[in-house]
Amino acid sequence: MKLLSKEIDKEGTGSVSIIPEESEDMWHAYNLVAEGDSLRASTIRKVTTESSTGSVGSNRVRTTLTVRVENVDFDTQACVLRVKGRNIQENQYVKV
């Protein structure tokens, strides 16, 4: 796992930016993330657009989501971290 930045104060609150490099790193991330935390990650979303003529098209865009963590689950077979939560920061493609 690659640590990009760490800002933690004396009370233990703060933020950490990491990049997982191996599948085992997701297990370590699972142990770091807790309910109530804010998690920011890059994702790809399908966005539909309607032109002035009324035709509808869709394309995939990369966007960053920030969610308040409600539940964290780890799939040991696939080494996948699943985080359930609500979006807390609005962006061009996702409304709050």
Image (cartoon, helix red, strand yellow):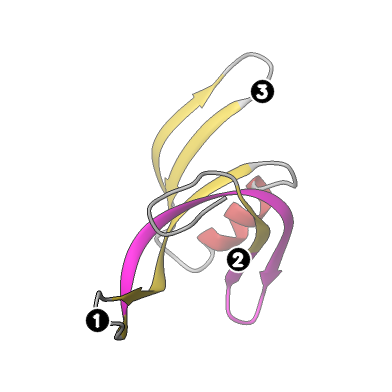
In this view, the residue farthest toward the front is 53
What percent of the width, then of the height, locates residue 27? Answer: 61, 61
Question: Which residues make up the magenta segment?
Answer: 58-82
What percent of the width, then of the height, locates residue 91? Answer: 42, 49
Q: Quadrant of residue 79?
A: bottom right
Q: Name the foreground residue: 11 vs 61.
A: 61
Q: Which residue is mark 2?
A: 81
Residue at x-position 68% and y-position 50%:
69
- In the image, taking residue 61 as reference, residue 66 lies left or right, namely right
Q: Quadrant of residue 75?
A: bottom right
SS under mark 1: loop
**Residue 66 inside the magenta-drawn segment:** yes
- In the image, taking residue 49 as reference, residue 40 lies left or right, namely right
Q: Label 1, label 2: how many angstroms apart (C-alpha)?
A: 42 Å
Which residue type does callout 3 highlight? Gly
Which residue type does callout 1 highlight? Thr
Which is nearer the N-term, disc 3 or disc 2? 3
Q: Which residue is mark 1?
A: 53
SS under mark 3: loop
Q: Which residue is mark 3?
A: 12
